[in-house]
Amino acid sequence: MAARPLVSVFSLAGEKAGETSLPAVMTAPLRPDIVQFVHTNMNKNHRQAFSVSVRAGKTVSASSWGTGRAVARIPRVGGGGTSRSGQGAFGNMCRGGRMFAPTKTWRKWHRKINTTQKRYAVASALAATAVPALVMARGHKIDDVPEIPLVVDDSVESTKKTSAAKDVLAAVGALDDVEKAGDSKKIRAGKGKARNRRYVLRRGPLIVYANDDGVERAFRNLPGVELCNVSRLNLLQLAPGGHMGRFCVWSKSALESLDSIYGDSGKGLPEPQMDNADLARIINSDEVQSVCKPAKAFNKKYLRKKNAVKNVKALEKLNPYAAAARIAETRAVEARAKSRSAVLAKRRAGRKEKKQYKAAGQAFYNKVSQQG
């Protein structure tokens, strides 16, 4: 196997104390689709069965009145002397009736997942923890973290006090993420607040160790901090919500044991579908372009089709006589428009001339009327 990049190992004081090689699983292909699928199905495997009572909504004695009484054939409560008698019962549309399709305890609650898919998802989630961009995209505060993945000396596994654990996280720059998780603590929205799930908070760093010499008790009380043994890596912790990029703090022995868990001596590593995923580089390479046919030049220009109803030239190609008739008609309309303006001008001039003699004519009429 080719040499892999080296990862710095930090002491409990935050100083560089050594180096170790990056495990091969950290270079696995990133497949968010597989991680999301496996997480969705795996997250269903801790559900408890629930259902409504088989007697709910059916505790009364009711029967249908049948036809011929001008009422619906829904079962009705018998008896008399109370407003309940005669009311509809049992149906999901009735007050006090059962629900539609009452839930049953024998629903398919759990899901089986292919072992190879689960291993692929865990390997992909582990590889995502080594990508700072994905870790920051998940919302983790890693501005002061010196390196991703963050590896701490094995002495962190013998930490026994929470105060000491807090100092270790502060020394390596991971305390900001813990405080972010602590500040996010809110009362749950919904009925879960009355069902022993009162508070919710964001996820903080995941502490991965190889041997528990007190590290569980030291870190477990910090808000948002979770712990996991490297031999029991869980996708629900590595990719909460199906989103890759969990901020992990590794002990040195835990990181080195990944090479024995994954690889030739352990679980098989998923192979990438493409050795080089840069498609643009492959297509534009000299090897590919040298055997490709040159691009075809489409120099032929297609004229736009003209509408013969609106365009005279297009009509002339189809029917020259109809085009000549339309041109003649257009000219006649233009000529009529010009002659009309001349006729109107002549009429207006005649009316104006008549108005000059109208006053004199009226005066003569009045005079003759007086004499008569």
Image (tube, helix red, strand yellow):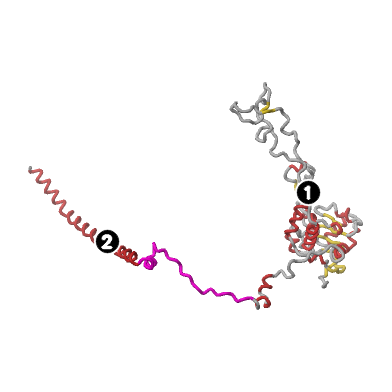
Mark before the other along the chain sequence, 2 or 1: 1
Q: Position of residue 40 (x, y in %)?
A: 75, 53
Magenta span has 325? no
Q: Which amino acid type corresponds to the residue marked 1 in the rendered image?
A: His
Q: Position of residue 26 (x, y in %)?
A: 80, 65
Between 310 and 124, the one lying in front of the other is 310
- In this view, 287 is above or below 206: below
Q: Indicate the quadrant where residue 371 lies.
A: top left
- Within-10-Å neighbours for mark 2: few <14, some 14–19, many 20+: few
Q: Residue at x 66, y 74 (%)?
A: 284
Which element type, helix, strand or loop, lies under badge 1?
loop
Q: In the rendered image, which residue does mark 1 sit on?
A: 110
Between 116 and 87, the one lying in front of the other is 116
Range of the magenta residues? 292-319
Q: Which amino acid type corresponds to the residue marked 2 in the rendered image?
A: Arg
Q: Residue farthest to the left?
A: 372
- Within-10-Å neighbours for mark 1: few <14, some 14–19, many 20+: some
Magenta span has 316? yes
Between 242 and 328, the one lying in front of the other is 328
